[in-house]
DNA sequence: CCATACTCTTGGTATATACCAGGCAGGTGG
DNA sequence: CCACCTGCCTGGTATATACCAAGAGTATGG
């Protein structure tokens, strides 16, 4: 079976990671130190580290080191609970940074919502953290007619969907989701503090209200092991 | 920006892949050939190949070579259209292999469905192909009381869910889904003809009927870039 | 004619080594 | 006291090379 040395190495590292996790030490020793300790080269060691990264056990922070990964976040993209709420509900610490807001046309949003390509949107781009680790970069485009004055409101500390319901009485009735494993592109990767090409999960959502009027389109880019998607459905024949 | 040579190399390879795809040539030249052609080493070349693999552009077949990847399959885990139907609907060629059937208890299934751990299930393990490439390894456990005689039926060429509806009049009313990026373990990896640790997507489903009686639990392991998950929801408040 | 054995090709694993570039802390000068 | 600079530490990229193991086709012998 496990003829390859790096498989054995991976198991040894797994033990090390468990130990570190047990004593709440989040960081692994330097690659050179580990390679010397296991009497191998950095190349082979990095192969094992990459393997564990693929399993979601550890992650890297650009030129800072390797860190033990926390358990994934449970996330239901069909519920409109605010990010802050469900992160806190899982005993984790949420944070949100708004990177950009503007008002302009956006072709993919228009196409997804079935609007003309010169339709303008309220656009919000933000970055979200769990326990101070950036795990999500998202952009959302809201149809201004559905939520006039949105960008003047406090759209960060309160749930956006909660506001759409509360302030504008919208029912988010029809939703379309698309999930896809991707490699993070330069911009998202930079925002999440990882190398371009790191594995990610892309979530795109298109939302209409009860009268089938277009409400919102958004694109999320998650660090792929940061979340576990759960969906509960009733009566969808 | 792209100081690293392997980034440049990745772009060159991307062009090559497009060319190959255009002339319907699915296979890339050997690593040694490519390395020589781009005047670099296999190590660096493999780094670029791994990058493209992460993007889902190419995939490898154990010691046979690198191949251009087909576009992902659209898949809606909330619909009970049969695998064969929606693969064909997308102009692809489906195939299913039953690897194993038996009848015995299974703890995870029992727990997910809220049954006692000594509950027995009809268990089917199978492997599914798209255009002769194995993309999915799945195991499903059906509560025998819901579908007596299931294993005697032709559960391969017809949709399983179609049978549950047609032969036993079941409505698959309540479903719970769980999606998670994973590294394929030895067994699934072998069944899919890839190396252990290859990126995969795990889908677990728990299904109850209209009377909230447990019907089925299943675990799917997909090659992660083989599919794009789409979900359409109505009126889920 | 078929099965077996050989051999070539392919990717997979591994060592040894070098230099680059960004994070970060500690020192230094204004 | 603060801003900048310097240098060390880290992971990131790259070369050169070797041998292993499984796939695949070919030659060979019954």
Image (tube, coloured by chain):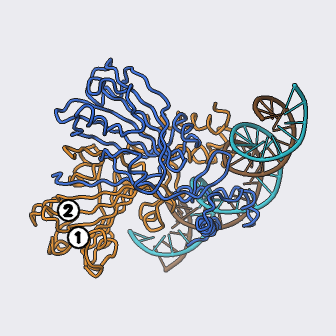
Chain colours: A orange, B blue, C brown, D cyan
Residue B17: x, y in percent?
A: 61, 65
Q: Quadrant of residue A173?
A: bottom left
State the SS at label 2.
Answer: helix
Is A159 located above or below residue B78 in the figure? below
> Which image quadrant: the N terminus of chain A?
top right
Find residue A82 and report its horizontal and vertical position in percent.
Answer: 22, 55
What distance separates the C-alpha of mark 1 from that of mark 2? 10 Å
Q: Secondary structure at mark 1?
A: strand
Q: Earlier in the sequence, mark 1 or mark 2?
A: 1
Relative side of A221 to A93, left or right? right
Q: Do tag 1 and tag 2 residues touch (Cβ < 8 Å)?
A: yes
Work out whether B135 lies above or below B21.
Answer: above
Residue under circle 2?
A160
Q: Residues within 10 Å of mark 1 (few under 14, many from 20)?
A: many
Which residue position holds label 1? A142
Q: Which quadrant of the figure has residue A176? A: bottom left
Please name which of the two marks, 1 or 2, marks the residue nearer to the observer: 1
- Residue farthest along the top direction in this orientation: B118
Measured from the top left, where is residue D6 in percent x and y? 61, 69
Count of numbered marks: 2
Specify few, some or many for label 2: CA neighbours under 10 Å numbering under 14, 14-19, or 20 or more: some
Picture coordinates of residue A107 (x, y %)? 33, 76
Residue A145, above or below B105: below
Question: Which chain is mark 1 on?
Answer: A
Q: Residue at x 45, y 60 (%)?
A: A193
Asked whether B32 or A112 is in front, the reply is: A112
């Amino acid at each position: 079976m496990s003829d390859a040395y790096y498989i054995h190495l991976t198991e040894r590292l797994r033990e090390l990671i468990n130990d570190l996790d047990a004593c709440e030490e989040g960081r692994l020793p330097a690659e050179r130190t580990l390679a010397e300790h296991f009497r191998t080269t950095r190349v082979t060691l990095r192969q094992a580290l990459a393997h564990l990264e693929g399993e979601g056990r550890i992650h890297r922070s650009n030129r800072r080191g390797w860190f033990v990964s926390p358990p994934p976040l449970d996330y239901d993209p069909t519920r409109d609970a605010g990010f802050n709420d469900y992160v806190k509900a899982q005993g984790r610490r949420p944070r949100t940074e708004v990177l950009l807001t503007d008002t302009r046309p956006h072709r993919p949003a228009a196409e997804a919502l079935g609007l003309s390509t010169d339709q303008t949107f309220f656009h919000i781009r933000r970055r979200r953290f769990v326990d101070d680790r950036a795990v999500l970069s998202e952009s959302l485009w809201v149809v201004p007619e559905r939520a006039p004055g949105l960008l003047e409101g406090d759209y960060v500390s309160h749930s956006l969907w909660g506001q759409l319901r509360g302030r504008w009485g919208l029912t988010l009735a029809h939703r379309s989701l698309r999930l896809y494993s991707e490699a993070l592109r330069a911009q998202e990767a930079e925002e999440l503090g990882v190398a371009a090409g790191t594995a990610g999960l892309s979530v795109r959502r298109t939302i209409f209200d009860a009268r089938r009027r277009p409400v919102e389109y958004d694109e999320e880019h998650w660090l792929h092991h940061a979340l576990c998607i759960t969906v509960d459905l009733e009566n969808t024949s």
